[in-house]
Image (tube, coloured by chain):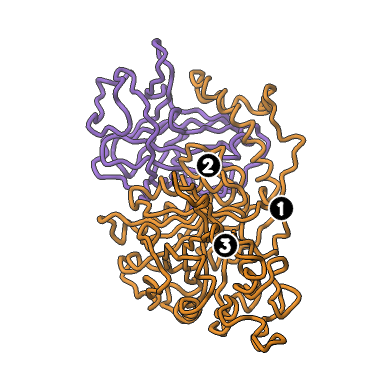
Amino acid sequence: MSEPVEPDTSRRLSRRHLLWGGAAAAGVGAATAAGVSIVGGIAGSVAPPSSGAATTADFTPQEAFEGAVPFYGTHQAGIETPAQSNAVFVSLDLRDDVDASGLRRLMSVVTDDAARLTAGQPALADSEPELAVIPAQLTVTFGFGPRVVELAGKAAPAWLGPLPAFGIDKLDPAYCDGDLLIQIAANDPLTVTHAARMLLKDARSFALPRWSQSGFRRAAGAENPAATMRNLFGQLDGTGNPSPGTTEFSEAVWSTDVPSWLEGGTSFVLRRIAMDLDGWDKIDRLGREETIGRTLDTGAPLTGTVEGDEPDLETKDRLGFPVIPAFAHVRRAKENEAATKMFRRGYNYDDTVLTGAESVSNSGLLFAAFQADVDTQFVPVQKALDTLDLLNTWTTPVGSAVFAIPPGCQEGGYIGDTLF
Amino acid sequence: MIRTKKSFSLIAVLAAGALALAGCSTTASTDGDDSMESTATTLTTSDTWVKAIDSGMTAAFGMVENPTDHDITIVSATTSASDMTELHETLENESGDMVMQPIEGGFTIPAGGMLMLEPGGNHIMIMGVADPILAGDDVTVTLTLDDGSTLEFTAPAKDYSGANENYEGDDDMDLDNGDMGHDDTEMDE
């Protein structure tokens, strides 16, 4: 369900025609005085505007922008979907007076918005419909915090709530928790922004944003989409991820041992990790590679030659020291990894620098991970990294949130309908 | 909750008559004739919605298409939200302001044509709303056509801060203002 699909021709046609439609509609508006018959009367007479012909005629959109990801399905899109270049994660707090019925109405409205926008169509009552016509593989993924589950009167999985406190955390409540998560991702930042605006407007009478975090990867088409993303330390980030479409992925991500409303869903952890780029600058390349246990260029473990090689934690150098040091990030993560890994789908962030600050960067990683069970797949790894990981010297978790991602829905239903 | 696959973006295409109409989400009942001979016996609606409101006046919007081979006029409408509904057009008055008023004789949609009901344009005016129409609520709208048949559709309510149409005769009136109520004496018949 999350594979990008070639849109049908009629929709592509319609998108081109929307550009003309703007002109045509303006004409209709100006001519309202003539009555509705004018609308029918223009049959066959719609033509592209002659001026400013910006046009679509000699332009072939690329799949990364033209393509739409199906919204409806067993699972929500935006998880197994190949990661798009831009994403915003928004956490909302429900207003105090929202009850179960309000929750249903909210999810019904935002589901409808998401279904339309991801198809490259304006939402109902979209006041900027022209911004909606490039789907750019937009996905909108919803997640629930504990309060939503409680409002619906259902049982929550044990892992739904704040993570255990870690020694390295310097959490800012401005980047933590929330009742409703909306992950909006697409290969075009304007598409992301418009979708976010539309969804937040429609959520406004039910819920207000608690925080919003934007992230990016390389632009769509800039590199092989199968390539592991690079973080702002220059490291490949997400090596060893379960591959979408495989049994390993399904087992790693889709929850089974959970309350029935969550079956076919998953869990989502978002950690905002501030990265000290100035401090990292002081480390030479060898030091950087030993810190992580991988080479920077290919991402291969120090004991291997290609990114996909399994790190060999036993190999010693000629002096008898482990080639992958005891403090190396990859060793700490590897030794404590569960049989089923988490699936990482992170984004870089690079926010405005603080006026007058010595540091010229306010950057980091939105470490986003989906896993069937937070307690067995995420927490043990994070605990190990907490106690000994040299990388902690330059990285600080400043935000943390956990959400339950309900399953997908079918047309006519809405995300979260399994709660009711 | 999308009731049809038909999209806003198809409007221009449909207006151009470039596409055959396929599928419809609306149910039509013709007095004394329940048989559905073809899909093109009456109007179809899509992308319908109602502006959420606490009380007072609001409006229903969407696209109405006439896939038949004859002109069809919508002569009146009723809704589940109140017992007072009018078909409105928006026109420019003598002083250049855009104002809305009941449309004389209803909306006639030519064969193969369509009617856009949209903020700032033609719309189905819903007046005297006593109970709040909350975002995500469904409002049922029933159109009565010139052949006596009716056409029913469901319109979800959405929060919308636009649609500040002026009523002819009252520059301050807008759809948000429930206190204004509706007064026939203010109407420009």
Residue ID at (29%, 23%): B172
Q: CA distance from mark 3 to mark 1?
A: 29 Å
- On the image, numbered disc 3 is attached to which residue? A280
Which of the pair A153/A357 is nearer the observer? A357
Q: Are marks 1 and 2 on the same chain?
A: no
Residue A231 is left or right of residue A272, and the answer is: right
**Which chain is disc 3 placed on?**
A
Q: Which mark is residue B18?
A: none
Residue A222 visible to the viewer:
yes
Which amino acid type is shown beneath numbered disc 2?
A: Thr
- Residue B145 placement (x, y as % from top left): 45, 35
Rendered view: A294 above or below A359: below
* Residue A183 spot, x, y in % from top left: 49, 58
What residue appears at the point 31 percent right and 61 percent down from the top-left corner? A100
Q: Is residue B164 above or below residue A108?
A: above
Residue B63, placed above or below residue A185: above
**Residue A336 versus residue B95 in the image, above or below:** below
Name the chain letter of the residue that bears numbered label 1: A
Q: What kind of element bears circle 3?
A: helix
Label 2 neighbourhood size at 10 Å, few (<14), some (14-19), many (20+)? many
Question: Amino acid type of disc 1?
Answer: Gly
Residue behind mark 2: B44
Q: Chain A colour?
A: orange
For marks 2 and 3, give the one nearer the viewer.
3
User: In this figure, which residue is indicated by the disc labeled 1?
Assistant: A221
